Amino acid sequence: MNFLEERILKDGIVKKGNVLKVDSFLNHQIDISLLEKMGAEFKKRFANKEVTKILTIESSGIGIACIVARYFNVPVLFAKKTQSLNVDGDKYFADVYSYTHKCMNHVFVSKKYISPNEKVLIIDDFLANGAALLGLTEIVRQAGAEVSGIGIAIEKGFQDGGKIIREKGFQLESIAIVDSMDSASGKIEFRKQ
């Protein structure tokens, strides 16, 4: 059992509807020492890959992406979900359905921050159905850049996202893969890696 699996068992809460609540340490209140371990782990798993930029989607992936970027010594870029006055110029767009919020997000990245020569490592907190990752890989494709790999903190292995991403040929590395969880008992089973 790895450090993230141990933390999920200690502080994660299984809710109805296949929801794994990890907001006490990962996506609301953030345990930086845990993120440091994740950064080191992703650096190890993608050590043989060239990485010039980290890409994530707002907002829960940003913290993890920033720590990972320190290990690769590269900038972080995140896809925005809403237009703001400080983002101008041409953009790459993708539609991403949020299963958490039950809505479609029209996410974008400014074209001036991702170029065709980029080697992009995509980082996010959760992988369930793969919609966010497919959107991010589409943005990288539009830019003519290359996806060096995809790093996920927690993958819901009982949903299709991991299978879809791996079948597309991407190197997908998930620190914890949940194979099953039960809200009645609170039991969580992890895939052996």
Image: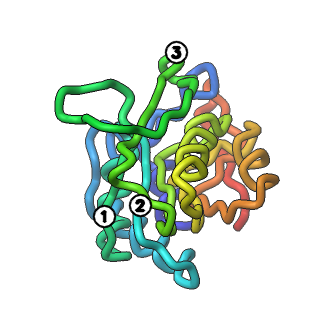
Q: Circle 2: is it few (<14), some (14-19), or many (20+) Cα within 10 Å?
A: many
State which quadrant residue 107 falls in.
top left
* Image quadrant where one finds the N terminus: bottom right
* Image quadrant where one finds the C terminus: bottom right
Q: Residue most toward the left?
A: 86
Q: Residue at x 76, y 39 (%)?
A: 160
* Residue at the spot of label 1: 75
Whether pointer 1 and pointer 2 mark residues with C-beta atoms closer than 8 Å, the reply is yes
Cα–Cα gap, marks 2 and 3: 25 Å
Whether pointer 2 and pointer 3 mark residues with C-beta atoms closer than 8 Å, the reply is no
Cα–Cα gap, marks 3 and 1: 29 Å
Q: Residue at x 57, y 84 (%)?
A: 48
* 154, above or below 1, in the image: above
* Residue at the spot of label 2: 54
Disc 2 secondary structure class: strand
Q: Position of residue 67 (x, y in %)?
A: 31, 63
Disc 3 secondary structure class: strand
Q: Is residue 116 left or right of residue 72?
A: right
State which quadrant residue 129 falls in.
top right
> Identity of the amino acid at label 2?
Ile
Q: In this orientation, which residue lies closer to the viewer: 112 or 57?
A: 112
Q: Which mark is residue 103?
A: 3
Q: In this orientation, which residue lies closer to the viewer: 106 or 182?
A: 106
Q: Residue most toward the right?
A: 167
Q: Is residue 134 left or right of residue 77?
A: right
Q: Is residue 9 left or right of residue 57?
A: right
